[in-house]
Structure formats: structure tokens, C-alpha cells
Amino acid sequence: MSAVPPAPTTPAPTTPAATTPAAATSAAELEALLAAAHGAARPLAALRPAERARLLDAVADALDAAADELVPIAQAETHLAEGRLRGELKRTTFQLRLFGELLRDGGYLDARIDHADPEWPMGAPRPDLRRVRVPVGPVLVFAASNFPFAFSVAGGDTASALAAGCPVLLKAHSGHLELSRRTGAVVAEALAEAGAPEGTFAVVAGTAAGAAALRDPRIAAGAFTGSIPGGRALFDIASSRPDPIPFYGELGSNNPVFVTEAAAASRGGEIARGFVGSFTLGAGQFCTKPGTLVVPAGSVVVEALREAALPPAAALLNERIQKGYAEVLEGFAANPRLDVLVQGPSPLADPPSPTLLVATAADMLAEPHALQAECFGPTAVVVTYDDEAQLVTLAETFEGQLTATIHGTDTCDVASLVEVLSRKAGRVLWNEWPTGVSVTYAQQHGGPYPATTAAGTTSVGTAAIERFVRPVAYQGFPQHLLPEALREDNPLGVPRLVDGVREH
Amino acid sequence: MSAVPPAPTTPAPTTPAATTPAAATSAAELEALLAAAHGAARPLAALRPAERARLLDAVADALDAAADELVPIAQAETHLAEGRLRGELKRTTFQLRLFGELLRDGGYLDARIDHADPEWPMGAPRPDLRRVRVPVGPVLVFAASNFPFAFSVAGGDTASALAAGCPVLLKAHSGHLELSRRTGAVVAEALAEAGAPEGTFAVVAGTAAGAAALRDPRIAAGAFTGSIPGGRALFDIASSRPDPIPFYGELGSNNPVFVTEAAAASRGGEIARGFVGSFTLGAGQFCTKPGTLVVPAGSVVVEALREAALPPAAALLNERIQKGYAEVLEGFAANPRLDVLVQGPSPLADPPSPTLLVATAADMLAEPHALQAECFGPTAVVVTYDDEAQLVTLAETFEGQLTATIHGTDTCDVASLVEVLSRKAGRVLWNEWPTGVSVTYAQQHGGPYPATTAAGTTSVGTAAIERFVRPVAYQGFPQHLLPEALREDNPLGVPRLVDGVREH
């Protein structure tokens, strides 16, 4: 890339004064919090699912009531706009209540009953076996920088872990410590008032405290949303413990978008506008930001992008992210395979204007790793192809992704492309944009490494609860000693698989 | 322990001549097999579940037909009795067919459909989202020593991976290489005749080939049944890859049994007989062998065990296992906390007679790690308690377990003990014995580390398939591009969660 201006020599605008950062959690404080979480595990697990639902509802109500206090703190600490933050808080409390619904339904318990069967054709009588999911124990959640509510203190990881019946220790993100402290206080107070066991939830701060907690035998699982290097370092800690624990890290994703010739021809301008809106949303700081747009060379899309009115410069979340963004953009600038397609007046300043780069399919095939480098901020790469058959070849060059998108028409022959992208990504989109991750029953926010460290799971949607439970089977048990979900008369009314047949 | 006789100075009996071991797989051979497995992944995944069921049935039929050829080879290589091996083969083919049933049902796909909903209360419209499980890709299975059929070439890991739609590379166990080669040939031929993609299944041999395959980017998951050190070494390889992959290791378990005072008083002799039968089954070479029996001091159980007629000496699977067994037993012998309760005439010989050791609850509390050491062979430890309240305290000293068992009566107050054991183990039994792991819908063969490296999963039972799938969500897709399980008219007739409601 040749035309990115040098970084401005004038001082960057001063970051709005944030509240004083909370002190890092000391070793003694951490020990007390770990002991409390450990102590809460048993009583929290002993609550009926519907009783835990009540706790989640109480947290949601308290957060809604605290919006006017919390949102301004979030604005000051993250530079995000009030409307966006209010929407994010609404999403967060909706999410807590949706997990409450899941608990009242009970299907997540995956309760199974096999009655004893002397004629079981395995060659030996089948004993009475009953299986249900139980909480794994205290969970350590690492909050994200970019969603101070929805992927942070009371976000999806916390909601799903609490729903599962696991105490949560929340490692605050350094980018919004005061918000974390205040949100944490609201959550803890709501839980206490609703009767949750002491130690059900607490916030810790500081990198050292986070790493120490992850090594502690009382922590049974980790969850994380952040960068590839940060997530990998924590995954390595979790995996190399004397007793390894699962670490559910959502790391990084390029989220490529593939545009067919027919789609480019029929609605190229609309695709260009949609792409600009998506890659610059939240100043490009979404984990699902489309980092690559693959389009026909010389198509309307390319021309529309070249002429596009990019949004104005917007401050990134914090100085560290601004610095990291500038470094990646400078790396792109030094790469002769990348040229500027269009950019705003101050691409390397703080705040930065958006930048769109361009390369050919041959360039991408030659250096996929460099051209697909993670770039957290308002920059994306447009890749032009001459032959639509290259879409599949290009798709194969990508590592694991959270999302991959196709823009096509009903007559496009994209079956092979769908097949490749289904192997690469956790979510595949058709004629939509990947930013915005709805919280639903069928959502999948995950994907093969390095998108996540656990491709079989999701961190958004109701299935996220499955990360924090494990199955236990009871063999030959008398009714009165069984968990309620497994008793013959089904007092909780949960759906069950009985002798291989679904009953509910 | 004081009274274990020294190892005999006469040479150990010669192992029956096994067939010539197969040569280790060369690097070039491995490369070809990995390429073939990689090539098979896409066509195998593209088969409808019911088509894969037909493949599993074909393998089961071929193995049943080959019983008279395979069982004698297994006898020669493992010293296991013909009856046991024929039963194990029957279990193996039953298991393959049960996974076939699972595929025809389709519930394992966990298909979910959320229709678009502009009023979704999250604060933003819900897109059309549809989620289904897809195969992860080629799986590397490490066969076990102790179940040459059911946890080996065509055992549970292979069956569940093939059912999921994943090609399998099977690392043969060195203890039964000729059987592995022959069984592998039967499986591969049956798959080929039934029309499976080339490369769907192959056997590799040699430690180096196994490790190299586990490091290969074409392998998407590993599965293993074996020892703690062996499994941990492989887990570490899988977790430290540039792209870490899940490694489902079933490692080691002590499988403690806790006997209440009332149970000991009411049926002490029966419990003693059951325990001897269970810990010596298959010469003590079951991963679910009860290694510890906790009983009231001075109870009928202790007296009955002291007088018990132990089964005769039986050859272990192979010389390496015999050597390892003798080392652990000598370690026990050197521990002053352990005494011999009863043992046969040749405890350290090859073949070894069974040994029962005894210690007090105080001894176990003082040195839980040493007294709970993994011992693969016909030795177990009886722990005597003076106060039934010690059952919970002793239970807390155990690490993660595959199983934990209580022998009690209906009037015993064991709720706390059940709670502790549910945290420690994947399967909790009441008045039964842990050896024998039925293949059913509700079975759970797993448990917290070191019982397994993935406590959220099972390696036995229909839920084992969940290890080898991952979810993919499709957003905004036209019907004709969706996987069949997600199309509106449900052509496969699979059970689904539609807008949060179960439909089938």
C-alpha cells in the first residue's frame, strides 16, 4: 500500500477523562473471592433451575433500573455513543431474561432415562441409568473491551454461567474499569437481595489476578472475548494446568464477504453501501466486522466503494486499541500488494478516519496470512477477482471464522462456496451483514480456531449454557436420592429422553 | 505394606507367541493416509445421516461375520478368554447399529430454526437463523489395550466419529497389532463395499506415527482411552498445536466404592463377594475397576474379604502391563500405611494372583494421592472407617473419577455423599458395581480430570457423537441452499426446535 499518510505529528486529542481506574485485585483479595466462589458453588447448584431464573431476572431488573447511572460511565470510558450503549444494555438484560426462560423450560438439562432392560440387545442386561447435566463449578469470565455491557460484567458469558448454576468471577477489562466496578456492584447487590448464595458473583481487576485465578484449582472453566494473542495465552494457561480446564475463548475473525458476479451486477451500489456501514459500525470494533470483501474486478461495487462517502473519524475504545490499530494499518501500508481504494482525511490520526484497501485475488492467494491479518478498527480490504470460480479458491485460504457471508442471487451456483464456508465458519450469512449478533435459540457465535478455542460451542444464544454444564449418570438409584429432573414422576416437568424416545 | 512376597526369581512364563507385529506406519504411508482422510471428509459429510447409518450397519454385519477369524487372534494377543471376547465383539457391533438408529432419528443434529421476527424483544429485529451440527473433520482415534474390540479399531470412538460423518484414522494399540490390522481390513472392506468414500477409515501403527498424525492440520479431533501419562502427553500435543484441537482422552480412574454401616450390617457378605468379582473382572484391567472400597472397621465386609476365595492368577494383557502392575504393587508394598488383607499365592508373578490391601481412613486422609494411585491389574485397597461421617471426608479426597459407588440402604442419610460424588464422577452407582458400562442413551462414561480430559463429554453411549460435531448457523438463507435438516418442509423428518418450541 502506498498512499496512507504518515501519522500526524500533532499530539493526539486527549482522551476524555475517565474515572480513576480501580486498583488491581491483590493476592489476598483474590484468595477471599476464590474461596467465596468455591463456597457458593454447592448452594447455587442446589437451586432449582426456576429459582436461578428468578436470580437472573433480578439482575436484569436492577441493570435496567441503573441505566441512567451506568450508561454515562460507559460513554466516558469507551467513547461509544449513548444510543449504542443503551441498546447494548437492553440486549444484555434481554439476554439474562432469555436464559431465565431456558431454565424454566429445563430442556437444557438434556435429561435422559433408560429403564432397566434385561433384554437389551447389547448382550448384557441394561441397568437403570439416568443422566442429567450439572454445573461445572466456578467460572472465570474475561470481559471484552468492545461491548462494555453485552460481552462484559453481566454479558453472555456471565449470564450463561450463572444460568448453568456456576458462580462467576469476572475479570474486568482494563478499558472500562469503573463501569465494571459499578455494574458488578449492581449485579452483586441484586443477587444478594434475591437470595443468591454469598460468593455467587464478584469482579476482579488486573492481568496478574486474572492469570492467577485461571491457574487456581477452584476455577472449573474459563470464558473470554478478545484478541488472538491474549486469548491464546490464557488458553495455554488453562490447558497446561495440572488439571486442565476448558477455556472458551472467542478470539479473532476476519469475517470475509464473497460477492457473486450476478449480485454485483444487480445491486452493486447497495452492496457497497451495506459493506461500508458494516465495516465501520462501532468504528470497526466488532468481532464480526467484515474485514474482507471479495468482488468482481471492475464491477459496480468497486466503483461505488471508490466513490463512497465514508463515515467521519470516530474515536476508538481506548489508547491501546488506537495504537494497535495504527500499527496494523502501517503494516498494511508497507505491503506493496495493498493499495488504498478510498479513505478519509486522517486514517492514522486519533480518532482515525476509515480506510478501504484493495488487492487482487492473486495478491490474496500469494499472501493470505498478511492480507487477512486481524485489524481492530475501521479498515477493510477489498479483493477483486476476474473469475467467479476463484471465490472457492479464495475461501479456502481463510482460517477459522466467526462468520462468512455470501452476497448472491437465487440463480447463482454457490453450493461449493457454501460448503467451504460451512467448514470455515460458525455462522454463514446470505445477503445480510455479519455485524450484529442476535441473541436467539439458533444463534451460533463460534467457529474453528482461531475464531474460537472451542468450535463445538457458542458464546451467544441459548446454547451458550452448554459450556458450563457436564453430564452425570445415576445408575440403579432409588427415587428419593435422584435429582428431581430424573425422578419418575418428573416433578420439574422437564422434557426428557425416556428409553430413547423424546417425551415432554 | 509388609507381606507381599518378593517378585519370583524364576523367569516369568513366556507370553504365548503372538502373530508378528505389524510394522510401524512410515512417514510416507502416513502422509498418504492423512491425504485420503482429508479427501473423504467432504463426501462423507455430504451423505445423509441415514446413508451413514447404512455404512455402520455394513461394518457391524462384516464384523459379526468375521468373529470366528478375529476372536482367536484377540485371544492370542491379549490373553482374554474367548467368551469375554465374543461378548465384547457383540457389544461392539450392537454399538455400531445403535449409532445407526441415532442417525435415522436425527435428534443428534440439534436442528434449530428461528424465523425472522421484527418484534424480537432484544431491541433489534431477529434475522432468520437456522442451526445444525456438522462433522468436525478427520478424527484420530487411539485404541485401548484392554478392550481389543469395544474400545479399539471399531469401538465406541470410531463408531461415534463415523456416525458424526468424520473419517477416522485409527492408531492401533501395540498390544494387539495383528487383531487391529485384521479388524481394520474388515472395516475398510465393508465400508468400501457399502460405498463409503475412499479414505473413510484406515489403521496406523507406531507411537511416532500417532503423534505425527495428532500434530497434522488435517486432523480435527483426537480420542483416546488409556493411561493418565499417555493421555496427558497426547492432550498436550493437541492443545499446543498452532491450531489447538479437542482431545477426548479417557485416562484413569480409581472408582471408589463407599459402604454405609447399615449396608455392611445387612448384606456384608454379598458386598464382599460383589467387590471381589468386580475388582478382579478381566484381571482388574477395566477402566471402571473399583480400586478402593470404604467400609466400616470391623464389619462383616472386612471379615468376609479376609476369608474371601480370590480368583486364580490370570495373565495380564501383555508384558508391559504386567511390568507396570508389578511396579505399582511394589510401591504399595513399600508403603507402611498399607497391609495385605488377603492375596493369592503369587501376587507379583506373571500371571499375578489378586491382592487386597487394607488401610485406615486416617491413612487415606494422610496420603490420598499414594493410596489412590492408578493400579491397572487385580489389586484394590480396602479402607476402614470408624465413623460414617468420614465417608464424605474421604470422598472429598478423590480427584475426578469415571465412577463412584455407594452401597447403602433406603434409610441411609447419604444425600451429602451423593452430592460430593456427583461433583467428582461422571457416573454414580447405587448398590451396583461399576465394571460393565452399558451402551445406552443415558450412559455417561466420563468425568472430571484426570478421569478424562473433557468432562462435558462421554465416550460411551449415544451422546458420544456430540464430540465430533460442531454447530453452524445459517442466516437469511434461501431454502435451496440450506442443509436438508433446516429446510422449512423438514424433508429428513428430524426433531427440531422452532422459535424456541420443540417440534417433532
Image (cartoon, coloured by chain):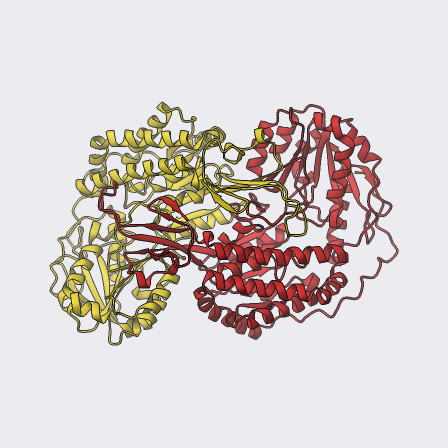
Chain colours: A red, B yellow
The answer to which of A225 and A397 lies nearer the viewer is A225
**Residue at (24%, 51%) from the top-left corner?**
B322
Looking at the image, can residue B163 be seen?
yes
B294 vs A17, left or right, is left
Residue B419: give x, y in percent of width and height.
Answer: 37, 65
Query: Percent from the top left, x then y, of residue A64?
Result: 66, 63
Picture layout, residue B207 above or below residue A409: below
In this rendering, the answer to whether A342 lies above or below B346 is above
Foreground of the two, B109 or A364: B109
Using the rendered view, name the quadrant where residue A355 is placed: top right
Q: Position of residue B314 (x, y in %)?
A: 17, 50
In this image, B450 relative to A356: left or right? left
Q: In the shown orientation, is residue B473 left or right of residue A21?
A: left
- Quadrant of the rendering where the N terminus of chain A is positioned: top right
Measured as percent of width and height from the top left, residue A461 is found at 57, 50
Residue occupying image coordinates x 67% and y 35%: A431
Along the line of sight, the residue nearer the viewer: B6 or B442: B442
Does the rendering let one see residue B7? no
Q: In this orientation, which residue lies closer to the viewer: A310 or A498?
A: A498
Q: Is residue B241 above or below residue A52?
A: above
Number of numbered discs on residues: 0
Farthest residue, direction right:
A10
